[in-house]
Image: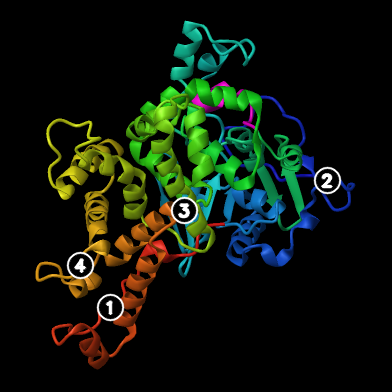
Amino acid sequence: MTHRSSPSSHESSAPGPEPRALPTGQGPRVLSADSIPRDALDADALRVVARLEREGFEAYLVGGCVRDLLVGRTPKDFDVATSAHPRQIKRLFRNARVIGRRFKLVHVVYGQHIVETATFRSDPLSTEAESELGGSAAEEPEEHTREALDDLLITEDNEFGTAEQDARRRDFTVNGLFLDPMRNVILDYVGGIDDLERNVLRTIGDPRKRMAEDPVRILRAIKFATRLGFRIDERTWEAMIDNAPRLARSAPPRVLEEILRLMRSGTALGSFRMLRACGALSVVLPAVDQFLGDPDDAAAQPRAETFWRLLEALDSDVHQGFLPTTAVCIALLYLRIIEREADPATREGPGVPPDLLTVTGEVLEPIAFQTRLPRKDTARAQRIVFQQRRFTQVATKRFRPLLFLRSEDFPEALELFRLRVSARGQGWDLYEGWRDRYRRLLSAPPSEVEAEFGPDAGPAPRRRRRRGRRPPPA
């Protein structure tokens, strides 16, 4: 098959091997483009690819969408990779905007839908740093090699290249596949098809180098392995263990984003167990890892089990269509630590425990500073943890259930309460009672609200549209 040449100014110095082109009917073990239903492809992404190809550029669907289509999943979004440079793309699409500093790419906008379009990239790392990585990947690196690995951390990523270079600079083989929807073929430069067939997650190239370039790939490896049910290649797993300490050098917002994705994946329990097994949890969430205690400490196991049950309850809810907000995720992660610090018998902090709201701040505020968590999310997480006691509180002059029901934070507080009830395996009737009262308050006319809740009830609260109620990503 003949491919159009890239107009990039950074061509490969030596021709690489031809990609593995997989047209229709190459045998029962080969995953061809024919296994992908045409109606599963995104119409806007096809429009972008077709326009770029008409103008003489290479353009393919790339990455996660190709992987998901081949394993029968519905992609969350469709990304395009092309030989056209960002300014060239923008000239072709009036509905496009160039974004990013570290990694410039183009968003082609169709109404509320965005097709992310990126130029083929080459590896930005110096050959000098790479040359210091010689030897077997399984060997323990010498000190000078460790320094070379430290120098691999990617800070710039705007070197344009060819399709093959772009595939080889990606993280995992299953994410390095290109789909040409115009010719109905898949281009595989990196052995991604074989790994998909074997259900294996493996880095492209030397695992030590890939993880050192971007330690956040450790979190991404866990995300893909648990979501897809794949086994992590042994050398890749060893590189994850070796590079876990380097996560401390990664941008805190990126790390937090990946942690939140793990929590919303429906595989939070397996993900966090794997994070702990490779040593990453002690780096990215040290307070949580410390709370769980030593895996070999029998005395710590009952305490750790209360945390694991919360994640199990979260996974169950996500599989039923619930997607937790950032505030609920943070509250859930640190709930058990807050409970420990609020109890005089188990508190590890100095002095007698102050009130619950203050204890919640003691635990969450340092975490928020460390992870660069927005203040609004921190404050909301504090409030919904504090409000948990309201669900078992008897109505008095100081506590009026109606005002609690009408508070802005009630929906998230109720979601956290449901997860606590599920983890404990008791209190479900109490949760359903609060849920039903809230639903009646939202839907009932003022006269019925007054009859049930009293003359000071006023109008029912307006339902807020929150991102946490979207269906979970595929």
In the rendered image, residue 211 lying in the magenta stretch gets the answer yes
Q: Residue at x 36, y 49 (%)?
A: 332
**Which of disc 4 and disc 3 is earlier in sequence?**
3
Query: Residue sitting at 40 percent across and 45 percent down?
Result: 257
Q: For mark 4, what is the residue?
A: 394
Residue to which mark 2 is pinned: 30
Q: Is residue 152 left or right of residue 372?
A: right
Q: Is residue 305 above or below residue 348?
A: below
- What residue is drawn where x is 44% and y is 28%? 298
Q: As rendered, which of 178 and 253 lies closer to the eye?
A: 253
Mark 1 touches mark 2? (CB < 8 Å): no
Quadrant of res 324? bottom left
- Looking at the picture, the colour scheme in use is rainbow
The residue type indicated by label 3 comes to Ala
Q: Depth-wise, is mark 2 or mark 3 nearer the camera?
A: 3
- What distance separates the C-alpha of mark 2 from that of mark 3? 39 Å
Q: CA distance from mark 1 to mark 3?
A: 28 Å
Residue hosting label 1: 462
Per the image, label 4 sits on a secondary structure element best described as loop
Q: Which tag, 2 or 3, sits closer to the chain's start?
A: 2
372 is within the stretch colored magenta: no
Disc 3 on helix, strand or loop?
Answer: helix
| Pair 3/4: label in front | 4
- The disc labelled 1 sits on which kind of residue? Arg
In three-dimensional space, the C-alpha distance between marks 2 and 4, rounded to whole angstroms, equals 64 Å
Question: Camera-side residue: 469 or 81?
Answer: 469
Which quarter of the figure is the N terminus placed in?
top right
Task: Tell me, for residue 313, which label it has, or none.
Answer: 3
Q: Residues within 10 Å of mark 1 (few under 14, many from 20)?
A: few
Give the camera-side residue of 426 and 70. Answer: 426
Q: Are marks 2 and 3 in contact (CB under 8 Å)?
A: no
